[in-house]
Amino acid sequence: MNTVVRLMLPVLLVLAIAGCQQATGERNPINNDKGEEVMTKTGKHVLQDLPYAHNALEPYIDERTMEIHHGKHHQAYVNNLNSAIEGTELENMPLEEIFRNMSQHPAAVRNNGGGHWNHDLFWNIMGPDAGGKPSGDLLRSIEKHFGSFSDFQEAFSRAGATRFGSGWAWLIVNANGELQVTSTPNQDNPLMDVADVRGTPILGLDVWEHAYYLKYQNRRPEYLSNFWNVVNWEEVERRYAEAIK
Ligand SMILES: [Fe+2]
């Protein structure tokens, strides 16, 4: 084997593998910034493990609720999303891209794609030994847009309390780079073109009854006020920095 052929062999091998993947519809898996696989090479969305134990948010959010919420509800959104996009042009497409043209896609993709994305954010913006206040740029921006941190908390809790039925309360960075509180029904979110107020969510609170009913029954306001004890502000600050880049 001459030197040129020997040098070219690894390149040819990579091209051949890529060709096979293309032919079978397979791509490289997509990982998140923690290195976890969020989409398989065949375009299937994957439910991530919780970043903490099911009982880690006690006493504010109980273990049983977390087990059912993550293991049953969130898993169902992932499974139903994968079924809804199987064999369609939406396979392999990042959810954020799907959301931009949400109005053109079926309700099953909207409900389950939103359900998957929203819960992913939700688990990560909470944590044990959390709560308190944000710091740095995010705190300054909250004070600028809402007057004070407690005024912001009040606005956010009001958005959650007044969302009729099921939905989410959000803190978003809007198109002008400003912070704004909003809410969406069902599993919609502000990344979707169907949302009344659009922007990048950096904090979200699930106000579906499945998120709190076992512990709080009909006492949504109590769940809303206890949420502040589990907010992982470090993660919200990270998302804020990303959103204003
Ligand atoms: Fe939920």
Image: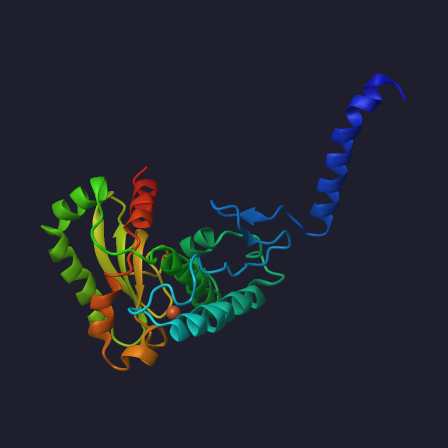
Residue 3 picture location, percent across and down: 84, 17
Q: Residue at x 29, y 40 (%)?
A: 244
Outermost top residue: 3
Q: Is residue 101 left or right of residue 78?
A: left
Please tell me how many numbered marks the rendered image carries.
Answer: 0
Quarter placement of the C terminus: top left
Residue 184 or 2: which is nearer the viewer? 2
Q: Is residue 236 left or right of residue 96?
A: left
Residue 173 picture location, percent across and down: 27, 48
Q: Residue at x 20, y 51 (%)?
A: 133
Q: Is residue 189 left or right of residue 5?
A: left
Residue 85, picture quadrant: bottom right
- Does 148 sit above or below residue 215? above
**Where in the image, quadrant-wise, is ligand 1 located?**
bottom left
Outermost right residue: 1
Residue 14, picture quadrant: top right
Outermost left residue: 147
Residue 113 or 107: which is nearer the viewer? 113
